[in-house]
Amino acid sequence: MTTSTHAPAPPPAPNPTTPPRRRLALRALAALHRLAERGWATTAVGVWAFLQASMFPGPVDGVIIPLGLADPPRAFRFAWAAALGATLGVALAWAIGVFAFDSVGLPMLG
């Protein structure tokens, strides 16, 4: 009878079918979750709303609802932080669109 020794299997590679944008969104959401655990829940909601409105889509409700259920007295503060973050994010997206259209969009069209 022979005995064979096998090396431990390498760790699994990241799923190549997950789009990079989705992985980035999940990492950002995980970072915001860590902020919320440390007592920065209102800031986490505002930052997530800002990112959602300006850079990549993601449901702000997925952050607000669990935090509001966990701490009902602060639910309105979370809602105001989300409204402010989304407003600032839309303003940033608008500014990027205005300046990118003048410097990049028109030369491409012309």
Image (spheres, rainbow, N blue to C red):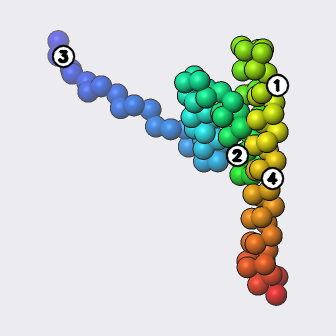
- The answer to whether 70 appears left or right of 109 in the picture is left
Badge number at residue 76: 1
The kind of residue tagged 1 is: Phe
Please name the residue that numbered disc 2 is placed on: 51
- Estimate how packed mark 1 is, as few (under 14), some (14 to 19) or many (20 or more) residues with alpha carbons within 10 Å: few
Q: Secondary structure at mark 3?
A: loop
Task: Give x and y (percent) for residue 7.
Answer: 26, 27
Write the residue at 35% across / 32% down: 10
- Number of the front mark, 3 or 4: 4
The kind of residue tagged 3 is: Thr
The kind of residue tagged 4 is: Val
Q: Secondary structure at mark 4?
A: helix
- Estimate how packed mark 4 is, as few (under 14), some (14 to 19) or many (20 or more) residues with alpha carbons within 10 Å: some
Res 5 → quadrant: top left
* Residue 58 in view (yes/no): no
Q: On the rendered image, what quadrant is the N terminus found in?
A: top left
Q: For the residues labelled 2 and 1, say whether their Cβ atoms are less than 8 Å apart.
A: no
Write the residue at 44% across / 32% down: 12
